[in-house]
Image (cartoon, rainbow, N blue to C red):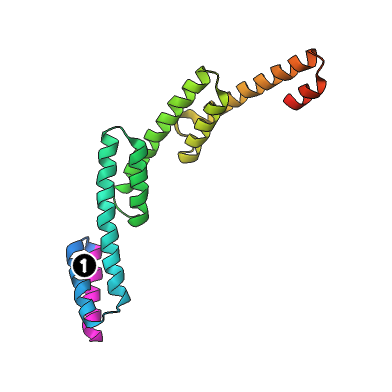
Amino acid sequence: RDRAYRYYVDLAQERLREGNLAEAESQAQEALVYQQAGQEARTVIQTVKNQREAAVLIERGRTLLAQGNPEEALSRLERAARLHPLHPDLSDLLGQARRGVCDRWLEQGRAAVTARNYPAAMRLFQKSQGLQEGYGGVDSLLADVRARLAELHLKGAQQYQQEGAAGAATFHA
């Protein structure tokens, strides 16, 4: 029984490495006939399940990217990455989704700068920086917003100083 189990588990693992999920699952199920508690066979079956689910998520992510919805695509692709991190298409698709999300955040951040909503712009640029470091000139955008905020605070402090509210001026600066 042990030899038969080992034979089918080895076949299942080989089929899994080849990417033949149906055959890998079939061989793992056959191994379980000889050893019901066989952990290696159960691991192959779980891996097959994960890879199938990841394939569905990747296709959904690809469709969402094509439809111009990078946020939802990124969510699906990140879930797929947890299930099957070595999928050959995943790295490129994740990069596309991250860039698409960052493009939106950068666009919204620029609009916030134009509207002089510097705190909102800062948050959006920082989110972009956290997702895709250095992408889209985010470093210079952050530096610009910080400079604008500092200038506003300095002007506010000077105004308080002129109005004789030195304590508020110190606090504001």
Question: Outermost residue toward the top?
Answer: 162
Residue at 52% of width from left, 27% of height from top? 121
Position of residue 61 in the picture relative to residue 147 (left or right) = left
**Extreme residue in the bottom direction:** 1
Residue situated in front as seen by the camera: 72 or 107: 72
85 and 161: which is toward the camera: 161
Magenta region, residue range: 1-17
Q: Residue at x 37, y 37 (%)?
A: 71
30 in relation to 17, above or below? below
Type of the residue with mark 1: Glu
- Main SS of the magenta part reads helix
Q: Nearer the viewer, residue 147 or 155?
A: 155
Element assignment for label 1: helix
Q: Identify the residue at horizontal 20%, vertical 79% (top origin).
A: 33
Image quadrant holding the C terminus, namely top right
**Residue drawn where x is 22% and y is 62% of the image:** 18
Identify residue for label 1.
25
